[in-house]
């Protein structure tokens, strides 16, 4: 699976949009971009995933560049409860690595009052 | 939907004893479940892939005889840490592939402390 690069940490003011970038320049055509987050001492929570098109759900939006080499997770109105470690993961759609998530260090997002 | 539970949430045991952790998919069937381990201030590390009705596949460096995995039904996988030692103290997290087969949903984790 392709490796991802994320900033170590980011800050955001409560109520503002949080934009979390991720670079995945070696992504291949059948690999998805997944975002999870982990609040302290809990299991990771699925946020969103996409292949080529931008995606939106009740939690966030995922913007994938046209060349698919990078993406941005957008939390439109961050709250204090969004403080967590955010993981961007590239995942193969099939083959022997099917379903295997490789977690990097992620981005520590701190939302301030 | 897509809820995964783990039991127990926290366990303390003596060195040399065995500990069993259960992972259940509550509202979907999961032919594939995964077990992860997370040490303090580190990221999650995949330990093994558990497929219903077959032997688990372990990642390199994970002792299969120490970490016994059983996936006897489509909604339950268990991880048994045998002869636990203090260095096995960690946060153990399971996940299950959702009904559509694309997305993993994680349990809340089990914190193991071996004295």
Image (tube, rainbow, N blue to C red):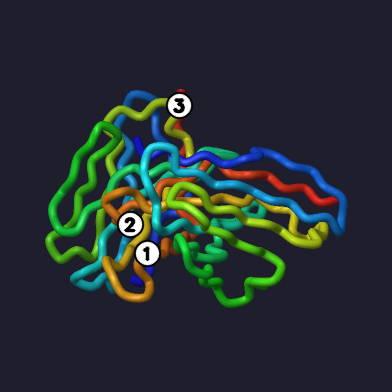
**Earlier residue among tags 2 and 3:** 2
**Earlier residue among tags 1 and 2:** 1
User: Residues at marks 1 and 2, common chain?
Assistant: yes
The percent position of residue B50, horizontal first and vertical second, equals 49, 62
Relative horizontal placement of residue B103, taking residue B50 as reference (left or right): left
Residue count near mark 3 (Cα–Cα under 10 Å), binned few <14, some 14–19, many ≥20: some
User: Visible in this render: residue A35?
Assistant: yes
Do callouts 1 and 2 mark residues in contact (Cβ within 8 Å)? yes
Q: Quadrant of residue B67?
A: bottom right
Which mark is on residue A22?
2
- Residue B62 vs residue B51, the one in the foreground: B51
Which mark is on residue B3?
none
- Residue B56 vs residue A30, the one in the foreground: B56
The percent position of residue B88, horizontal first and vertical second, equals 74, 59
Q: CA distance from mark 2 to mark 3?
A: 22 Å
**What chain letter is assigned to the residue under label 1?**
A
Q: CA distance from mark 1 to mark 3?
A: 26 Å
Relative horizontal placement of residue A48, taking residue A46 as reference (left or right): left
Q: CA distance from mark 1 to mark 2?
A: 7 Å
- Residue A95 vs residue A65, the one in the foreground: A95
The residue lying at 19 percent from left, 71 percent from top is A29
Name the quadrant of the N terminus of chain B. Answer: top left
**What chain letter is assigned to the residue under label 2?**
A
The residue lying at 38 percent from left, 69 percent from top is A3
Tell me the residue that label 1 is attached to: A4
Tell me the residue that label 3 is attached to: A80
């Amino acid at each position: 699976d392709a490796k991802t690069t994320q900033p170590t940490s980011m800050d955001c003011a409560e109520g503002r949009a949080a934009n979390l970038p991720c670079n995945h320049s070696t992504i291949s055509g059948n690999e998805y971009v997944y975002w999870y987050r982990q609040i302290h001492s809990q299991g990771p929570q699925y946020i969103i995933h996409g292949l080529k098109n931008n995606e939106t759900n009740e939690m966030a939006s995922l913007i994938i560049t046209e060349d698919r080499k990078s993406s941005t997770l957008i939390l439109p109105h961050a709250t204090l409860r969004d403080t967590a470690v955010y993981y961007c993961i590239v995942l193969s759609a099939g083959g022997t690595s099917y379903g295997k998530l490789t977690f990097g260090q992620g981005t520590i997002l701190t939302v301030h009052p | 939907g897509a809820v995964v539970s783990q039991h127990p949430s926290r366990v303390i045991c003596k060195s040399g004893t065995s500990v069993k952790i259960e992972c259940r998919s509550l509202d979907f069937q999961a032919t594939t479940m995964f077990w992860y381990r997370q040490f303090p201030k580190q990221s999650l590390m995949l330990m093994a892939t558990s497929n219903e009705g077959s032997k688990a596949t372990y990642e390199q460096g994970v002792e299969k005889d120490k970490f016994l995995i059983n996936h006897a039904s489509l909604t339950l996988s268990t991880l048994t840490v045998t002869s636990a030692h203090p260095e096995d103290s960690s946060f153990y997290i399971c996940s299950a592939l959702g009904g559509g087969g694309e997305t993993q949903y994680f349990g809340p984790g089990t914190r193991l402390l071996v004295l």
